[in-house]
Image: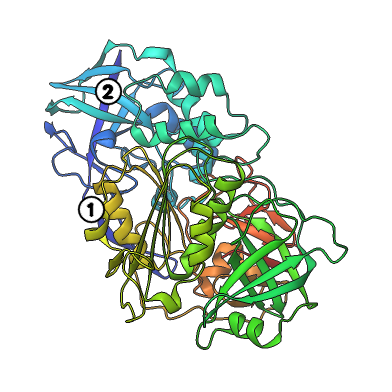
Amino acid sequence: MATLVSVNVGMPKDVAWQGRTVHTGVWKAPVDGPVMLRRLNLDGDGQGDLAGHGGEQRAVLVYQLDSYRHWSGVFGRDDLTPGSFGENFTVDGLPDDEVCVGDRFRVGAALVEVTQPRVTCYRVGLRLGEPQLPALLVAHHRPGFYLRVLTEGEVRAGDDIVKVADGPQRVTVAEIDALLYLRGHDRDLAARALRIDALSPGWKASLRALLDQPEEHAGNAGLAAVAAPPAWPGFRPLVVTGVHPETADITSLRLAAPDGAPLPAAAAGQFLTVRLGPGLVRSYSLSGSPAGPSYRISVKHEPGGAGSGYLRDHVRPGVLLDTAAPRGTFTLDRSGDPVLLVSAGIGATPLLAMLHDLVERRADRPVWWLHGARDGAGHAFAGEVRALLARLPSTREVICYSHPRPQDRPGTDYTIAGRLDTHVLRGLDLPPPAVAFVCGPAGFMDDVTAALTAAGVSQIHREQFTALATLAPGVRPSAAGPPRSRPGPGPTITFARSGVTAGWSDDDGSVLNLAETCRVPVRWSCRTGVCHTCETGLLSGDIDSDPEPLDPPADGTVLICCARPRTDLVLDL
């Protein structure tokens, strides 16, 4: 029989960390006497980041005295006291390699159920001053686990912890943790784990992604989207064979191999990255047939835009452009579900490639083309889209002009006068089992995503042309300013989406640290090669990893929290 040794609570607070402020609830302290355990929390307890911790599925975090003894030996420390690992229940017994997801226990007057392992993030390392701890918790098979509260009641230190039901499938906490985070993902074990009703929805989604991942694709689809390996490493010259104006400010370029050989097929929705000059690297969605012998990209000319300006002023047929292979995970699925292609302005380009793909594969799934433009003069690809839709058996087209011209014909050129927004989408009777692909300005995508979700569409994929917003869990935002380049004595690193070039210094420690120094928007959580949140496309160059990721990223990508440049790098960041 296990014992509840200590009940630990703590409210979130601000702490200083690497020159920043982190809001975190990882500091917990023992409580004397009875504490009420409620559906979402212990009385007196709170979490600083509810996206990663807390909630019904993660109401109580459990950690074991045996693991305390283990880490005391590993780190040579004698100062580890209950609550040091951010846990609510410090227990004697209940080892991770014996407790199974779905097990139920009576603790005091409460009834609880095991839902998932701890999701390790940097804050447990911050709490103990051991930055590598998030990776070590997984590598040493000692993550701890979360409980869901089935029956509320008082608990106190000294209570017996009595098992009242075994979880189905008998998959231990340590097994399911290793299944997601370590190399060698056992598909049979993943299928078994998915049959456990108690497993939290987030973990179920990750395991389904692992099962859906093609076996020939490297990477960990449970943590980050994966795609086929890039068709060639680094950059290769492609020749411009055609330049075609689509509107006054959108131009399409046709690129081919200089020797005339067919180019490798792309996946519908992917993008090309072109190197236009030193430090001038830009990415543009493929807008034509992904299986054709050549590639087409379509570029909007932005006022003051260095990349689009260079293409407008210098690129003509016969010019060679250094080009990286097609990349990206915003790609058309192969299901038979209805597909919604929703775009505004130049956001139509990756969806147009998907439309070409649907026609070429003679797909019989229903296809909805929903597009917003200012007016007919700014409506790129209108004739091409209509010709493609006419070749499919089940389609619907809705075109919204926010400011139609007098010569724009309602019912012919456009469907609705006004923006493609929540009001329009609510009136379309969208099919809930549909798969939606959305591309356009960030605000447009946020509005469309909310409307689609309200309509019951759950499979929503988005593509953003610019750098993604920073994701730094718990870190208080600060007015840092725009991204900035920086010289350095080592290899040159180009952050393509941000338009920043920086020189490496060994003092940087990792590419992630360098990116933060240059104010490049970055996304991370563990900072030790576990969670893959920082997985980023490596367009060219070679890296070393320190520490080594627990599970390697997909081909053509790197975990920037571990990466150190061996050569000059170009990153899709």
Viewer-nearest of labels 1 and 2? 1
Question: Relative to residue 201, is residue 106 depicted above or below?
Answer: above
Q: Which residue is mark 1?
A: 426
Q: Residue at the spot x=70%, y=78% of the render?
A: 276
Q: Secondary structure at mark 2?
A: strand
Q: Position of residue 108 (x, y in %)?
A: 16, 21
Dot 1 surroundings within 10 Å: few (below 14), some, or many (20 or more)?
few
What amino acid type should be assigned to the residue bearing mark 2?
A: Glu
Residue 113 numbered tag: 2
Scheme of colours in the image: rainbow
The amino acid marked with disc number 1 is: Arg
Q: Secondary structure at mark 1?
A: helix
Quick one: label 1 or label 2, which is nearer the N terminus? Answer: 2
Q: Position of residue 244 (x, y in %)?
A: 64, 75
Task: Give x and y (percent) for residue 510.
Answer: 61, 62
Q: Work out whether residue 479 or residue 422 is closer to the camera in this orientation and state it.
A: 422
Query: How far apart are labels 1 and 2 at the CA level?
Result: 39 Å
